[in-house]
Image (spheres, rainbow, N blue to C red):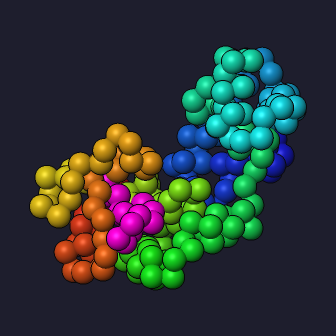
């Protein structure tokens, strides 16, 4: 398999995430009888422009959905470091929000194995698994943590409409970083 066909080699993934994607890709090939190169060619022939539309097209045309569809699209349209920089620049336009996000991200980098990954709508931090994410909102930065919201009165349950990974159960809108938040970030990291 070529590097272009292996999005799980990305520096924005933990070893556990890379292993999960590699296993999913191997299973897809074994179960479908199509090589990853065949799946990549099919995905690149898709008439759709957005990832959401491509996902819908793969499901409608080939019954491919979920993680398998994401693996195929990741291999067909690999993200680049420049793309991550562009996503970050588009997301963090407000200098005050960017400064606060940078401080929160720095607070979450509690070990050398923490990976910061840029997504379209948020910036995530993972160790073994994702334990934290930040995104801009009116009034500050929305912090999502892989904690039970009952851990602190500062936290609230993540609404289903919140565009963060499901494992981030608690959220809070932050206007400044304080010691309580540093402690909560450390708890989320320790659990991850």
The verdict on residue 138 being magenta is yes
Q: Residue at x 74, y 67 (%)?
A: 82
Q: Is residue 90 left or right of residue 34?
A: left
In the rendering, at what x and y percent does residue 162 appear? 39, 47
Considering the image in quadrants, where does the C terminus appear? bottom left
Q: Is residue 117 left or right of residue 156?
A: right
Q: Is residue 162 above or below residue 119?
A: above
- Note whether residue 81 is visible: no
Quadrant in the rendering for residue 105: bottom left
- Note whether residue 145 is visible: yes
Q: Is residue 169 above or below residue 43?
A: below
Considering the image in quadrants, where does the N terminus appear? top right
In the rendering, at what x and y percent does residue 167 appear? 36, 45
Q: Is residue 133 above or below residue 161?
A: below
Q: How many marks?
A: 0
Q: Residue furthest front?
A: 138
Q: Is residue 28 left or right of residue 152?
A: right
Q: Residue at x 48, y 67 (%)?
A: 113
In the rendering, at what x and y percent does residue 120 appear? 59, 56
Secondary structure mostly taken by the magenta-highlighted segment of the chain: strand
In the rendering, at what x and y percent does residue 147 appear? 25, 54
The verdict on residue 62 being magenta is no
Q: Nearer the viewer, residue 113 or 98?
A: 98
Q: Residue at x 50, y 63 (%)?
A: 123
Q: Is residue 175 left or right of residue 154?
A: right
Quadrant in the rendering for residue 135: bottom left
First to last magenta residue range:
133-146
Q: Nearer the viewer, residue 38 or 137?
A: 137
Q: Residue at x 29, y 57 (%)?
A: 171
């Amino acid at each position: 398999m070529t590097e272009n066909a292996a999005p799980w080699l990305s520096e924005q993934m933990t070893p556990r995430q890379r292993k999960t994607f590699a296993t999913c890709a191997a299973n897809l090939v074994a179960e479908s009888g199509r090589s990853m190169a065949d799946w990549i060619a099919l995905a690149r022939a898709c008439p759709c422009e957005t990832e959401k539309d491509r996902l819908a097209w793969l499901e409608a045309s080939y019954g491919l959905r979920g993680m398998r569809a994401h693996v195929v699209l990741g291999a067909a349209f690999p993200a680049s470091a420049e793309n991550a920089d562009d996503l970050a620049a588009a997301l963090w336009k407000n200098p005050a929000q960017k400064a606060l996000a940078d401080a929160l991200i720095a607070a979450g980098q509690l070990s050398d194995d923490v990976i910061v990954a840029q997504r379209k709508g948020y910036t995530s931090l993972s160790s073994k698994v994702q334990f934290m994410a930040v995104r801009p909102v009116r009034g500050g930065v929305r912090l999502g943590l892989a904690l039970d919201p009952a851990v602190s009165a500062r936290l609230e349950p993540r609404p289903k409409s919140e565009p963060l990974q499901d494992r981030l159960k608690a959220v809070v809108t932050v206007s400044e970083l304080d010691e309580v938040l540093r402690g909560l970030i450390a708890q989320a990291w320790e659990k991850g």
